[in-house]
Image (spheres, rainbow, N blue to C red):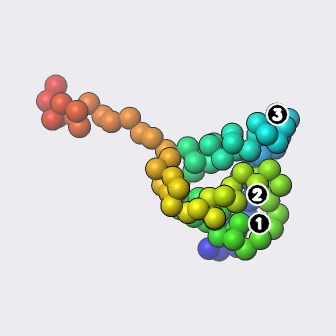
Amino acid sequence: MSHSVSEKLVMMANQIAKAFEPQGEARALPQIREHIHLFWDPRMRRGMDEIISAGGQGLHPFAYAALKEDVKHPHREADQAGTKFPMDASSVDGGTD
């Protein structure tokens, strides 16, 4: 992963952590994790796993704490929580209108 990509991922994770920080650690950590699982592409999450595996340099402590379990248990919810897109009508009714 290039240096600029990892910097951007850290910046984005930190922004998310700072947005949830006022709620306190106990409430913020699961919300940070959920937000990243719902809205980040699997490639972005794998990039963050690499950052955390390397020590999480530059990450907000809440972001690191929220995501470190994913690195320890990579198959838990692996890529199941990717962004969900609604099916279009043609995929449901065979394409006939």
Front-most of residues 95 and 76: 76
Residue 56 badge: 1
- Crowding at label 3, few (<14), some or many (≥20) Cα neighbours within 10 Å? few
Residue 64 badge: 2
Q: Secondary structure at mark 2?
A: helix
CA separation, marks 3 and 2? 16 Å
- Location of the N terminus by quadrant is bottom right
- Vertical position of residue 60 compared to residue 17: above or below: below
Front-most of residues 55 and 40: 55
Q: Are marks 1 and 2 in contact (CB under 8 Å)?
A: yes
State which tag comes first along the sequence, 3 or 2: 3
The answer, for residue 54, to whether it is visible in the render is yes
- Crowding at label 2, few (<14), some or many (≥20) Cα neighbours within 10 Å? many
Q: Which residue is mark 3?
A: 23
- Residue 56 found in image quarter: bottom right
Q: Residue at x 62, y 43 (%)?
A: 34
The amino acid type of the residue labelled 1 equals Gly
Residue 29 in picture, x, y percent from top left:
74, 44
The answer, for residue 5, to whether it is visible in the render is no
State which tag comes first along the sequence, 3 or 1: 3
